[in-house]
Amino acid sequence: MIAPAPRNVDVLIIGASLSAAACAKRLVDAGLETVVIERKKLPRHKICSGILSPRGHRFLVENFGPLPRETMHEPTSCRGVTFHFPKAPSIDIDFIGGPTPHLYRKHSDWWAIKRSGVEVQDETSFAGLETAADHVLVNVTRRGRPEQFRAKWVVGADGPTSMVVRALYPGYPASIPWFLVGQKLHDIVRCPLDQAYFHFWFHPGLGHYTWSHARDGRQIVGVGFDVGHNFDAAHQNVVKYIGKRHGVELGPARDSEGCGENFGLSLINRYVFGKGRVLITGQAAGFLNMMAEGMSAALHSGAICGESIVEAAFHGEPAQYVYRRAIHSEVRRCSDQWNPLLIAFGRPHEADVWAALRKLSWSERMMVIGDVVMFVRLYAKFKWGRQILGQSVERLLSGKYDARRWW
């Protein structure tokens, strides 16, 4: 059988994510022939809390229109984040600007992709690429059949375990720490945790990232931990703790799911933005906000990626150069949220942490600080301290983070 000739397109986007939708919107509006491929059948499930920041909500409304009801879970909105501590009192931290939608990622991502106007091919897997001076040849498998695209530019928007990043930088996965995050959905017997908030525990005995929130009549209990640890044991430890500490009574878990996360890149400014005509965006690039969501950074970085390609297409500058110059704004916004100097003396978040702390006594505030310090010690083995401090000073002196650290 003779293999079909490669299809020529302006831009091929890997992954039907929110960052892909934002990128595609810019490209389609500019008249560039753009195709999104997605390995799963659409609309596809997405492991995500669905808690959206005010900035992400504004972007969706401004670029795609009002959110339809089917794009949201029940409860349909979230007021903010509740932080829990081993010793200090819990604190409710409201989003600045009021509640935001609780996105049902299976339907919200598909809605945004459709609203972008881009052509989509689902059940199509990325299988590799070859770069040339004026194009990128991309191998895909579409419903079991090999096909090819010849694209002027390629965008990797395929999440933290990005196959596009691995194709560009085979040594990349071994160069960063990986975490597994898993969650189970429980029937609720009794749950005093306020359903209007996303709940997070600063507790070193529970895991690197421990959370719970209500979704469609059930309660999610999730935990993040080092690769190699036992998820069931870590999860059961959290269930027992929140039962004893908060009076939460849950039925057996009916569903369980997990994934790998490239958590840490935004803390130490080690983003990966691609090479040549291949651009990386969203969480594949390392964007992850501090306040329990990464969707706003995915949307904005995706839009910047699309705008950079448009600039390259119509004005002749290399897209990678334009992108790395323009993406500084999103790097600042994301990494600022982890910057200890800005946390102490600025307001880098979209939730009013200081308003919540002002409600506590001075002794309670000191307890919060002590518990946070004990929690942060979990990450000492990654030796991020000097890197975070160094990048914080760089941001203070130059107004931005060092682009030489980017892949």
Image (cartoon, rainbow, N blue to C red):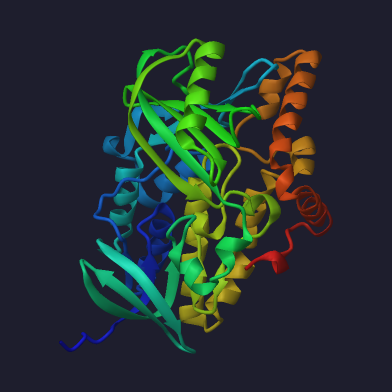
Residue at left 21%, top 69%? 144
Tell me: 80 left or right of 137. right
Residues 242 and 237: in front is 237
Residue at left 44%, top 47%? 259
Residue at left 49%, top 41%? 181
| Vertical arrangement, residue 307 with respect to residue 267, above or below | below
Residue 113 spot, x, y in % from top left: 32, 55
Residues 197 and 183: in front is 183
Q: Residue furthest left?
A: 1
Residue 321 spot, x, y in % from top left: 60, 76
Residues 193 and 69: in front is 193
Pick the quarter of the image with the C terminus.
Answer: bottom right
Q: Quadrant of residue 367?
A: top right
Residue 352 spot, x, y in % from top left: 64, 29
| Vertical arrangement, residue 340 with respect to residue 37, above or below | above
Tell me: 321 left or right of 238. right
| Vertical arrangement, residue 266 with respect to residue 49, above or below | below
Q: Quadrant of residue 171?
A: bottom right
Total number of numbered discs in the rendering = 0
Pick the quarter of the image with the N terminus.
Answer: bottom left
Residue 51 visible in the snapshot: no
Residue 295 visible in the snapshot: yes
Residue 91 spot, x, y in % from top left: 63, 20
